[in-house]
Every structure is written in structure tokens, then in C-alpha cells.
Image: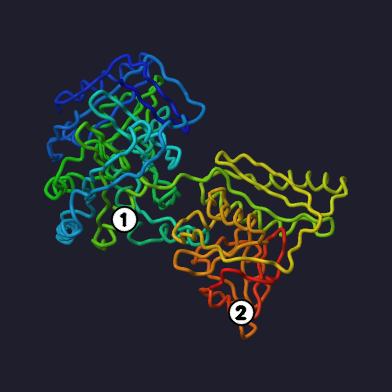
């Protein structure tokens, strides 16, 4: 069955109502192919299709390519009708892990990078985009895998094309060309860094990338190349938003934007003739870089680094750059990955960057909600409210979901009026934000919230994975904490203490931990052990003489005293600890 999904300005569309299927296998037919699609657009139809990387040869015979017999040079679907989906369909298959097998090993990769650097040193090129293929083992149907991916790893230019012969899954974050009226825009993407789990570290990585000399060099070279390409067909070409860094679930990406006013008499073929293939996936200068790509790469790129496009009936269009794009055939499934090589590139870091770019395949699903809890008291109002709202805002930014802080404050003010009118003394307040940014506030009346003389145990049924990025955010992705809390209730403990996989002491199921050591010093575990940056812990470090260190069970055993606390119960001293040995 032939069908397609595609994103347009944040809206997901679907169609299996195919009016015409178009395919082009010869470079000399590309102009007629594109003209026919443009005619369908002018006649009021939506069209979705792709140009493979190998279609580049149709626009300039100097564009060197490796012959490809897996895909046509170009293919498109013209629809009788399309349907906007109000939400992403729920997949009916459980998401399974994808195995990734690079087509070359690290030694082969490093050899090609050294050859690329020699070309740069000799003045042949300023930059080349070197890529290789990975063979994937998908354990889901392609359509179901696409639906999981766009839920778990949302990007602005995603698309899915299914035919009887192949399927294309594109999770592209990169815009090649966009036309709105007579304004033509491109947004090349160069510069990558890995996300960090903690907000402060992640924000530092984002800022560091925006100032990274290598990333800036890559970015400005390709922006300049695309500016030159647009200048061939546009007036008033201008560059803006250089070195802009955008967060995606698994990485940060740097972009720049170039736009100009298009001559309305130019055809779609004229536009592509001046710009295709995208400069961000070739290098600069483009023709020499493509010659080097053809020499060094061992297989055709296919859909990878080509472009999936959507032509609208009003003449507007969007072309993505097919990165993070999977090509599924009956005998194999392929993913291309690569990076831009400049004079100061190192083969080791570039190899690591390539592997990072495949991490979206197995990136864990986002939590349904992020939340915070704190005490309201008639005498003290909301306990450290602004600190809680700031942490919640940071977590929402980290998770790429909206949060209206002012609206939340307003709703809490209304709740406080209600609590005061009801003569409530204490209440536990819970503020949560779901995946769509919707706010929920609940309250639970408490008689006496404060902890004292706690009976606790060491929880040994499971342990914290300190490499899981979600542990640094208070979300409903907290199975280990829920199991530990249930364990405490079943065995009549006030709380339990959880360890990480290295056996280091971390925190309670609903509380932060502090000890007073044999010298009388207040000590708390290091965040990197895998600990929520709790507000109770933050207030302690801001107002007390506290040191952070990696804590062991021996440290607990030798401590003068142990305390557990949270923003509802405050700090309570531990009276006894079971399972300590």
C-alpha cells in the first residue's frame, strides 16, 4: 500500500489517497519530472516526494556520484486529498531496540578523514562532508517505527513515504529550502554537541557549542556557500541568526539562516538547478568536495543527504535535508551518518559525533509529565515556590515542552485563596506539566507533615542508573523510586535509601539525603552519582556549610547522624537503618 505522513509548520498530515505516482530513473528526465510536479501543484494538488543524493548529477554533470540501483533518482506522490491529524497516531507495536552495524570500522573511517584533511591542507577544499552507511535491524514495521520516533524525538521536517518496493523514514531537523510567497529561505545545519542530563550542564554545552571555533568555522563556510547559491536566483539576500543553537532530544545543533526575494518568473527546476544538492552535506567548494566524496565514500548515499519535499497548491514548498533518514528495502535497511570535516577536525571526535547522530534510533521515550511538590502552610505560604517554578521551567526547557510560569503563579494564587478560606493548616501541592504543556495543580490536606525519628532501610531490590538523563528531572519516569516507595510501605518503613549501580549512596524514594560525619561536617552525595537536584538539597547548599562527596554504605554506618528531607516533610533525623551491611 502506498501512503505518506509529513509535517508542515508543526502539523502532521497523512494520505493514502494517491492521484499519481511519479518516478524518475534517468538524469535527463529530471527537469520534466519536476515541471510535471509543479504543474500538479498549480492545479491545486499537494505533492510529497524525494530527490536522492544521486539526483545531483541532473543539475550539473560535474556533480560526481556513485551509481545507485536501490532507489530511483527521484520519486513523488500527488494526492487527491490529505488529512491533518490532530495528534500523532498511537503505535500499535511496542518499540523495540534497533541494532546498528556501521559499514566501515573506525580505522577505515580515520584513514578517510586523514585523506580529507590532506585535501584541505593542499587547498582543494575548505570542508568536506564525509559519510558512511550503517545497516540496521529494525524490530518494528517501518510505519510503526516512524510513529514511535516522531513521538519520542520530535523534529520539524519529519516525513514517511511507503511504497510496495521501499519505505523512507525521515527524522530530519534540517531545512534545505522553504518558499513562502516570493521569500526563499535556507537554514543549513553545522555544529553538533551531545545533550547533558542536568540542566546547568546542558545549558553550558549549548552555549559552548555556539562559541566553538570548529563549529563556527563549519557553520560559516556552509552558510556562505548557501548565500552564494541563493544569490544566483534571489535579490536582497541576507544572512541572519548565525550560530543559533537548537536543542533536540539527543543533541544540540547549530544553524544559520539565509533568505532572499525570489524572482517569481523562476520555475522550481530553476531554483533547484541553482542550489541542489544542499551545501551542508557536500562541503565547499561544492563541485570539488563532491569529487572527493565520490573518491572516498564506499557506497551510494541514496535518500541520505538528498531531500524530501512537500509542494503546496499555492506554490509554497518545503525541502528538508535527509539526515537522520532511514531507507528500508526488502533485503536491508540503511541509515547514513556523517559529519563536516574542516582543517582542525580530529578523526576520533568526528567518529564519536557520527555515532552520536545515530542515537535517535534508541533514544528513550519522553516522560508523560514533569512535576514538583511542595508544602503550603497557613503561616509560611508556599515552601520555596520560586525555586520550584524555576526548576520546573528548566526541566520543561530540557524536555522541549512549553510551560507558562506566569499562568502557573496565577493558578497557585487562586488555590492559596481557597486554602485560606477553608482554614487549611497544611497542604501538599503538586504542580505537573504534561507532554503538551498542559498544567495540572492538585492539593492534599495534611495534619502534621514533618518527619522525625525515621525508621528506614537500604533498598537493594534495584539500583539507580546514573547515566539515565531523566533521573535529573522530577518526572513520572521513576519506576525505581515507585518500587522503592512501595517496598517501604509494605514493610512499614518511613523511607528507604537507594543506591546506584556502583553501590554509591544516592537518595530516598521521595527524599534527599544528608549525613553528619564523624568530624561533625554536613555531607551530601554528589549529583553525578545519579541524584535529583532537589530544592531541599539546593536550599541546604545555599545556606549551610556543606560538602559534596561520593558516599558509601560505610559512610552511612560511621556517620554521627543521618537525615532525609523533602519540600513537604522538611528534614527528619533517621533513628534506625536496616539492611546496612
Where is residue 503? Give x, y as percent.
47, 68
- Look at the picture and state if 189 lies above or below 148: below
Q: Residue furthest bottom?
A: 519
Q: Image quadrant of residue 32?
A: top left
- Residue denoted by label 2: 559
Horizontal side, residue 335 vs residue 85: left or right? left
- Residue denoted by label 1: 353
Horizontal side, residue 97 vs residue 206: left or right? left
- Closer to the camera in the image, 354 or 322: 354
Where is residue 302? Give x, y as percent.
21, 37
- Closer to the camera in the image, 520 or 269: 520
Where is residue 276? Give x, y as percent.
25, 36
Q: Image quadrant of residue 112?
A: bottom left
Distance of mark 2 from mark 1, alpha carbons? Answer: 44 Å
SS category of the residue bearing label 1: helix
- Look at the picture and state if 263 lies above or below 191: above
Q: Residues within 10 Å of mark 2 (few under 14, many from 20)?
A: some
What is the basis of the colouring in this image? Answer: rainbow
Between tags 2 and 1, which lies in front?
A: 2
Which numbered circle lies on residue 184?
A: none
Q: Image quadrant of residue 107?
A: bottom left
SS category of the residue bearing label 2: loop
Amino acid at each position: 500500500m502506498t501512503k505518506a505522513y509529513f509535517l508542515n509548520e508543526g502539523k502532521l498530515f497523512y494520505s493514502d489517497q494517491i492521484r499519481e505516482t511519479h518516478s524518475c530513473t534517468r538524469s535527463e528526465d529530471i527537469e520534466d519530472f519536476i515541471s510535471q510536479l509543479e504543474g500538479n501543484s498549480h492545479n491545486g494538488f499537494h505533492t510529497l516526494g524525494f530527490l536522492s543524493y544521486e539526483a545531483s548529477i541532473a543539475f550539473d554533470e560535474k556533480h560526481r556520484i556513485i551509481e545507485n540501483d536501490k532507489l530511483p533518482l527521484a520519486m513523488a506522490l500527488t494526492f487527491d486529498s490529505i488529512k491533518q491529524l490532530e495528534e500523532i497516531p498511537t503505535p500499535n507495536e511496542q518499540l523495540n531496540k534497533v541494532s546498528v552495524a556501521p559499514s566501515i570500522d573506525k580505522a577505515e573511517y580515520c584513514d578517510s578523514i586523514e585523506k580529507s584533511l590532506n585535501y584541505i591542507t593542499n587547498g582543494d577544499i575548505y570542508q568536506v562532508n564525509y559519510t558512511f552507511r550503517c545497516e540496521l535491524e529494525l524490530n518494528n514495521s517501518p510505519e510503526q517505527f516512524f510513529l514511535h520516533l516522531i513521538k519520542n524525538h520530535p523534529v520539524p521536517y519529519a516525513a514517511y513515504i511507503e511504497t510496495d518496493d521501499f519505505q523512507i523514514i525521515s527524522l530530519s531537523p534540517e531545512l534545505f529550502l522553504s518558499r513562502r510567497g516570493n521569500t526563499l529561505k535556507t537554514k543549513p545545519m553545522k555544529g553538533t554537541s551531545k545533550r547533558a542530563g542536568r540542566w546547568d550542564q546542558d545549558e553550558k554545552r549549548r552555549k559552548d557549542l555556539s562559541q566553538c571555533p570548529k563549529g563556527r568555522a563549519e557553520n560559516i563556510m556552509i552558510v556562505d556557500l548557501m548565500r552564494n547559491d541563493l544569490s544566483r536566483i534571489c535579490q536582497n539576500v541576507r544572512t541572519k541568526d548565525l550560530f543559533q543553537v537548537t536543542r533536540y532530544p539527543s543533541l544540540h545543533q547549530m544553524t544559520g539562516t539565509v533568505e532572499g526575494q525570489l524572482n517569481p518568473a523562476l520555475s522550481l527546476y530553476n531554483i533547484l538547478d541553482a542550489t541542489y544538492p544542499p551545501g551542508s552535506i557536500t562541503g565547499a567548494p561544492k563541485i570539488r568536495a563532491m569529487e572527493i566524496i565520490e573518491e572516498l565514500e564506499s557506497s551510494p548515499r541514496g535518500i541520505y543527504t538528498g531531500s524530501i519535499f512537500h509542494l503546496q497548491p499555492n506554490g509554497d514548498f518545503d525541502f528538508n535535508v535527509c539526515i537522520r533518514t532511514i531507507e528500508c528495502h526488502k533485503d536491508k535497511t540503511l541509515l547514513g551518518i556523517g559529519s563536516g570535516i574542516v582543517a582542525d577536525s580530529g578523526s576520533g571526535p568526528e567518529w564519536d559525533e557520527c555515532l552520536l547522530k545515530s542515537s535517535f534510533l534508541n533514544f528513550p521515550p519522553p516522560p508523560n509529565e514533569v512535576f514538583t511538590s511542595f508544602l503550603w502552610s497557613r503561616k509560611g505560604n508556599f515552601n520555596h515556590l520560586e525555586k520550584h517554578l524555576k526548576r520546573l521551567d528548566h526541566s520543561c526547557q530540557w524536555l522541549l515542552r512549553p510551560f507558562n510560569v506566569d499562568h502557573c503563579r496565577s493558578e497557585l494564587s487562586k488555590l492559596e485563596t481557597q486554602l485560606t478560606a477553608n482554614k487549611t493548616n497544611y497542604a501538599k501541592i503538586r504542580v505537573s506539566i504534561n507532554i503538551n504543556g498542559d498544567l495540572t495543580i492538585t492539593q492534599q490536606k495534611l495534619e502534621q507533615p514533618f518527619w522525625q525519628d525515621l525508621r528506614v532501610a537500604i533498598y537493594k531490590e534495584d539500583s539507580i542508573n546514573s547515566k539515565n538523563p531523566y533521573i535529573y528531572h522530577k518526572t513520572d519516569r521513576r519506576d525505581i523510586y515507585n518500587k522503592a516507595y512501595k517496598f517501604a510501605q509494605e514493610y512499614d518503613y518511613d523511607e528507604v535509601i537507594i543506591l546506584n549501580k556502583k553501590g554509591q549512596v544516592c537518595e530516598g524514594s521521595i527524599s534527599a539525603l544528608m549525613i553528619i560525619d564523624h568530624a561533625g561536617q554536613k555531607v551530601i552525595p554528589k549529583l553525578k552519582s545519579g541524584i535529583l537536584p532537589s530544592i531541599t538539597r539546593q536550599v541546604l547548599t545555599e545556606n549551610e556549610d556543606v560538602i559534596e562527596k561520593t558516599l558509601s554504605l560505610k559512610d552511612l554506618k560511621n556517620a554521627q547522624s543521618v537525615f532525609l528531607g523533602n519540600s513537604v516533610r522538611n528534614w527528619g533525623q533517621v533513628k534506625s537503618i536496616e539492611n546496612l551491611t
